[in-house]
Amino acid sequence: MSWVGRSIRRLEDPVLVRGDGRFTGDLKAANWLRFVRSPLASGRIVQVSRPEGADVFTCAELVEVKPIRPLLHKFNYVPISQPVLARDVVRFVGEPIAAVVAATQEQAEDLADRVEVEIEPMRAVVGMQDAIAAGAPRVHGEAADNVAVDANFKTPGFDVAMASAHRRIAIDVRSHRQNALPLEPRAAHAAWDRGSGRVTLTCTTQTPHAMRTAIAELIGMGECDLRVIAPDVGGGFGQKMSLCPEFVVVTWLARWLRSSVAWLEDRRENLIACFHSRDQRIALEGAFDSDAKLIALSADILANVGAYSCYPTTCGVEPLMAMAEMPGPYDVREYACASRAVLTHTCPMAPYRGVSRPVITLAIERLMDKAAAAYGLDPTDIRRRNLIRSFPYTSATGLMLDQASYVESMDAAVKATDVAAFRDRQAQMRAQGRFLGFGLATFCERTGYGTPAFAARGMEITPGWETVEMAMDPSGSIEARIGASPHGQGLRTTLAQIIADELGTSPHRVKIVHGDTDRTPYGWGTFASRSLVIAGGAALLAARKVRAKLTAMAGVLLEAAAEDIVLEADVARVAGTDRAIPIETLARAAYHQAHRFKGEVGPGIAESATYDPAGTFSNACHVALVEVDVETGRVILENFLVAEDAGRLINPMIADGQIHGGVAQGIANALLEEIVYDDAGNILTATLADYLPPTACEIPAIEICHLETLADASVTRAKGLGEGGAIGAPAAILNAINDALSPLGVSINEFPATPRRIRESVRAGAQR
Amino acid sequence: MTEKVDITLNINGRDYAVRVEPRRTLVDVIRDDCGQTGTHIGCEHGVCGACTIILDDEAVRSCLMFAVQAQGRRIRTVEGLADGDKLHPLQTAFMTHHALQCGFCTPGFLMLAVNALETNPDMSDDEVLDLLASNLCRCTGYQNIIKAVRSTAAEMRRARA
């Protein structure tokens, strides 16, 4: 019986439900740190006071620490430097200016409150269109027009195709700024070891090795002298994958103080000064032929990336992903795109679940619905005419889309929804003055991509591969050490399922070690729907090597050919016979009685494998049924359905959990959550009561149906699916709202579609 | 405000004699001074509920109280839910229904729901939903938390019948 494909309980859970998880904030420290942050969006630092009794550190003390300066080698990237503590000028509200150290958290807060920062205000630029307007103040002197990435793409036949259009349909979409909002805010604890001079940094990160590399380089220490531990981490969703300056300061201070020092971010700091996302405008135009087939697509993308460029992806991550993946699951050969990263005096942007895809999916799915209306087609008909059906498919931007089920997943979603019955009910309700809407979003999600994908983006650092080191110790226990760094995804369980099948054991006997640079091979962590595909693939390859070793050993001891040995139920057996030996006995012999293998097999059981795949696209169709109260602008989500294809499901329970969580964040993005700045660059949404994350009452029951396309692009046949839920939901919901409002002749193409925005568009329609 | 006072907190049946500043919140003292780190801090303004504990017979936000206010009252935290190796039925239900992912909000949800199951064992499905809207979870989309609590409520009703 196979473990893969079964919804076994997670191996992570017993510790967590007892409250025995170990999070960064649980550690004690000799020193506590509080940051003094900028109250202004733009200004020149005149003076930082040093109250009596306060240990205050500024850029003057940290003068030898290099600024954060990630690199891109393409797309007219302007390298931007971010000092870990502001130097001379401040560029966003919340930027750290000074660090105050005291024996307790409370004392550090008290002292930090007494630090006075004198700043000469300068003109701030907050919105991206203001930032690129002539005469706008420059956020960084080196970036003229405040443009940090200026990318352009055009296929040779684009102009001809565009000119030959039967119809051209245009749409402008806007997504407002959001915060990934993991429930555990950031935290860091660095401890200097007197004996070795090493520092152990325990922190809330998704990428421990990348943090080690970056921090060691900025501080000027050997990587071997820095150990980074990601213990239990309370969610990340991308926000914890980038380097934050605070972690550099904490590490530097542990060395400076020759002691331990800790920092706990509070929620206000998280909302104003941790990374933001999704602040984009897209103008999209599609050229369709007389059969409503999309023949050319043009996109103009602006991404407000804030004041600095995030490490390691750079601020190109949103505009460049949007440019490369805009056509999505649709077959369109001619494409032109201009995509810019715009600097403003706001909190820096970094990846958040889905990165640009919730926004580009909104754009192209709104375009499809608008085109369907223009051609008098049903939304599913126009998609059926345009979805890619034959694989592998090389996109206009050169992406290789592997075997998938774009049409089939839409058909499955529509069938499960019973659209005909809904349309009847919708018509009846409209007669009663109520507005119901149906919306769908079809999309593909690039997952598990290796180094070539990042190289194509021109990144100096190209994350991609993963290594898994696997050992069976003399007691027969299996340990797999991985470079991925799960923080809620259940990877300990799913990798154990994959390994257990290969080695004829049960997942409970497989221990997955992660999140400690002293214990695990170099790797890239957990983000971009990559871990199950890449670390899972490497785990499978390593397990095959361990299996080969075990069968070779059993072959010698049982006097049979290695290929005749099967591993099952913790026993190595000559197939079809009762000649068998417990795997535990083999493990013991491998270390303690190596002589028994007569030199044919070497001692010990330790293997390693690396996997660097090209990438694999999962896909889904989301369907939302809504009712819009046109008097109040409230949107009630009646039903939400996901038909999704992530290839082989290793643990269906965990896969469903990832979809639920992603969809909930997508619903929040679509209807509720928004970071609001005033014109001076102050954040007006600095508590959870203002930012509006959803509660259980805002998320309806989510129905899921699975399709399983087994593509060769992934060695386990599993595709990633961590982000998909968040990608499709906003577009499906916006399409449903627009369907509901269609009798009023109005539309809304921005998220979150708050009651105020819906009322504005309803009022605008009434005035026409 | 920085003058310390002596108080005794009773957490999960055990007394902790601590010396704290009166301004310190209950959650900080439970975690830092009493070493019970299962109770988490997510926002410190009473919105997220990660710090929910049971105080006497009420589920409360321990970030919105001072430790000195809890003197002489019975405090229950997630560490006290299991009876040795035997988990509370709701802890088991959370595992069975995959009601947790990163596990950071889990202690708060468990304490919120355990208190409700004890004080109002006949909660309807709608009441469960209403109750769970008190706390925030960022990973699960709430689907499986709702399932776990509803199924435990139903199981407890069956056991009583």
Image (cartoon, coloured by chain):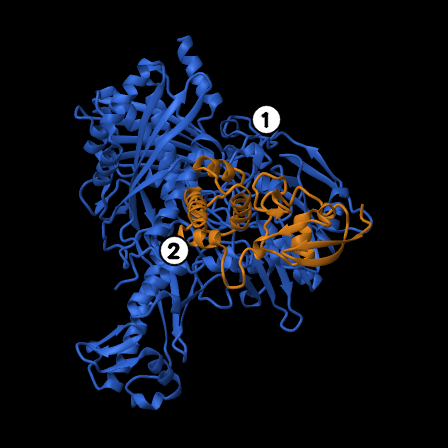
Chain colours: A blue, B orange
Helix, strand or loop at mark 1? loop
Q: Residue under label 2, please give it.
A: A531
Q: Nearer the viewer, residue A514 or A128?
A: A514
Compared to residue A684, the image places residue A49 above or below, namely below
Q: Is residue B53 visible?
A: yes
Q: Amino acid at mark 1?
A: Asp
Image point 54% across, 53% down: which residue?
A204
x then y, percent, for residue A339? 40, 35
Q: Amino acid at mark 2?
A: Ser
Q: Subunit of mark 2?
A: A
First in residue order: circle 1 vs circle 2? 2
x then y, percent, for residue A231? 53, 59
The N terminus of chain A - image quarter = bottom left
Q: Subunit of mark 1?
A: A
Res. A679 mark? 1
Compared to residue A170, the image places residue A354 above or below, namely below
